[in-house]
Image (tube, rainbow, N blue to C red):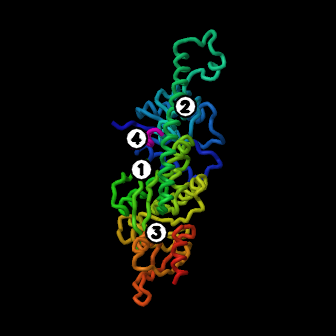
Amino acid sequence: MQEKVLIIAVRQPRQEEERFQSSLSELQSLTETAQGNVLKIITQNREKIHPALYMGEGKVQELTEIVEEWEIDLVISNDELSPSQAKNLGERLGVRIIDRSQLILDIFAKRANTKEGKLQVELAQLEYMLPRLYGQGKSLSRLAGGIGTRGPGETKLESDRRHIRRRIDEIKAKLQAVVNQRAQYRSRRKENRAFQIAIVGYTNAGKSTFFNRITKSESLEENQLFATLDPMTRQIQLPSGFAALITDTVGFIQDLPTTLIAAFRSTLEEVTEADFILHMVDASHPDLENHQKTVTKLLEDLGAEKLPMLTVYNKKDILQEDFIPSVHPSMTISAHDPIDLKRVLHEVEQILIEQWEAYQTLLPPDEGKLLQTLRRRTIMTDRYFDEERDGYRVSGYISPDHPLKYRVKEQHERE
């Protein structure tokens, strides 16, 4: 049974109308992803948000009537509400009140499949909930007893807080163990010189569709926000035979709750450890410019903005008009078109060729193992058997900091 939802939003003078409208349509999509049915959206222009009620007195009165008339089950605010605003609105409207952050946390909770994902979501939810436990929280801690503070309700509040803090500490310890394990995996990948590509992008840009088609695997693929929560890594081959690991990451979104960014830090670090970034953008989305800015900003926050990157404008099959990309290097594709997928991999190689060093070498016939390694670890452009010199002539491009570079040079110098 779908809950009947009323969305409320305040637009302040500094907010652009276009950005405001896009955040509202996104909130509506988020609500639908969480199985809610948005019956009405009420907005108000205000100089600043009402400190006690979020919206003005008159507007709150109007909301009370709408809640009654439309038999609303849940009110969702476009902005993060303070504990007192949520409490006051709940008392005035007589229904549950949540904000955008809680809604995103709720979706994440439904989507988390791995142990790590579930722990990360629980941590974010608890840290969000802690200051929002109603009651005389702070004054109670200061008084530590006294007349009027010893009722069972307040004792329960304090024990709730203690329980939540203890649980937060437990989860952080468990997550630290997972982070350490993930770091070991990453260092092992680095030792093996595995080249890592991370697919990043705004939520619902088509990352998982692209990932599944290119790796022929089965990560969750839906036309919904945050369909993918747990990162998945698979091996692929670029056209030259160069082997790479590719990771499908969690989608980004504007105004992502800070508790979530903190909790998902270890997952997002997959991006910072990558050697190359594929930034997927939904070319058909009316607000794609803001989507790109959000992702770029998050990459900067993670310290990953300097990595080599190809922007892939996806969903060209549903574009209604000619599309002109705003960044370079980039390409426009449909993740459902096998030829387009090959074009992306070819373009990744071309970008690497521009940045890497050219090599030429002659390998003796008994160096078959090294030949295979060069095929998988470098972009090999030519290889043939030179009968005169009794060896394999190999040329291609290699990462400047790859240890194989010196092996290749040694072989070249021996000629």
Residue mark closest to the camera, 3 vs 4:
3
The answer, for residue 271, to whether it is visible in the render is yes
* Residue 337, x across and y down, in percent: 35, 68
Q: Earlier in the sequence, mark 2 or mark 4?
A: 2
Disc 1 packing (10 Å; few <14; some 14–19; many ≥20)? many
Direction from residue 115 to residue 16 in the image, left or right:
right
Q: Quickly name the residue at label 4.
A: 110
Q: Earlier in the sequence, mark 2 or mark 3?
A: 2
The reply to whether discs 3 and 4 touch (Cβ–Cβ < 8 Å) is: no
Q: Identify residue type, mark 3.
A: Arg
Q: In terms of secondary structure, where does tag 1 sit?
A: loop
Q: Main secondary structure of the magenta part?
A: helix
Q: Which residues are magenta?
A: 106-119
Q: Identify residue type, mark 2.
A: Ala
Q: Quickly name the residue at label 2.
A: 86
Q: Quickly name the residue at label 1.
A: 228
**137 over 97 or under it: above or below:** above
Disc 2 packing (10 Å; few <14; some 14–19; many ≥20)? many
Q: Residue at x 46, y 34 (%)?
A: 66
Identify which residue, 142 or 18, lies in the foreground: 142
Q: Residue at x 55, y 65 (%)?
A: 308
Q: In terms of secondary structure, where does tag 2 sit?
A: helix
Disc 4 packing (10 Å; few <14; some 14–19; many ≥20)? some
Identify which residue, 401 or 176, lies in the foreground: 401
Q: Earlier in the sequence, mark 1 or mark 3?
A: 1
Q: Identify residue type, mark 4.
A: Lys
Q: Quadrant of residue 39 in the image?
A: top left
* Residue 279, x across and y down, in percent: 50, 61
The reply to whether discs 4 and 1 touch (Cβ–Cβ < 8 Å) is: no
Numbered mark located on residue 377 in the image: 3
| Alpha carbon distance from label 2 to label 3 | 56 Å
The answer, for residue 241, to whether it is visible in the render is no
